[in-house]
Image: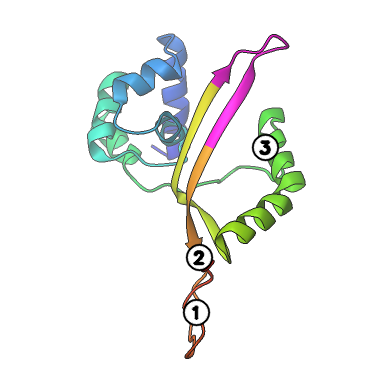
Amino acid sequence: MTREKLTEKILDLKRERQLSWKDITAAIGGMSEVLIVGALLGQGRLPEILASKAATLFGLSRPEELLLSEVPMRGLNSPMPPTDPLLYRFYELLMVNGPAWKELISEEFGDGIMSAIDFDMAIERQPDPKGDRVKLTMSGKFLPFKYYGAGEGVPENGAKQK
């Protein structure tokens, strides 16, 4: 069984049982919906206790359950730029706004990055008379670049001094 085949099987079972992602994430629980769905789509891993819950929910074999707990090769088979219109819009947001985001983050925090590992994300529906809106809230830990070999009087990293 490959990760891709397991993803196909899970999606087939989701359709067959008419489960929503909300149903699935509520049954598995234990962490963010985004992380659970991502893991079931092959882009992340589930801790063993959650892989066991997923296996029970979907009637998976022990090897399939173990596969859900393995660290995957993330991003495989994903064209760049993305071809799916929704995913392409995120790519477009990054291309158009990314340089401004980088400047504003650098000005506030210093020389570094926002972690995509120590990261939280929430997706909400915002009712609007002109059409409902998608609200994304992202929060990532700031990780300053380390200045290797920094000598006396040179800061050890790029974090902005307060």
Q: Which residue was labeled with disc 2?
A: 162
Cβ–Cβ below 8 Å for labels 3 and 1?
A: no
Residue furthest right as drawn: 96
Q: Earlier in the sequence, mark 3 or mark 2?
A: 3
> Can you see residue 13?
no
Mark whose residue sits in front, 3 or 1: 1
Crowd tier of the residue under label 1, counting other residues whose Cα lies within 10 Å: few below 14, some 14–19, many 20 or above? some
Pick the front one: 8 or 37: 37
Rendering coords of residue 145 (x, y %): 52, 69
Pick the front one: 128 or 34: 128
Mark whose residue sits in front, 1 or 2: 2
Q: Earlier in the sequence, mark 3 or mark 1?
A: 3
Question: What number is the disc on residue 90?
Answer: 3
Pick the front one: 4 or 21: 21
Rendering coords of residue 67 (x, y %): 33, 40
Residue type marked 1: Pro
Residue type marked 2: Lys
Q: Quadrant of the N terminus?
A: top left
Q: Magenta includes 127?
A: yes
Give me the C-alpha separation between circle 3 and circle 2: 33 Å
Residue type marked 3: Phe
At 57% from the left and 64% from the top, the residue drawn is 110
Q: Which residue was labeled with disc 1?
A: 155
Q: Is residue 161 left or right of residue 64?
A: right
Crowd tier of the residue under label 3, counting other residues whose Cα lies within 10 Å: few below 14, some 14–19, many 20 or above? few
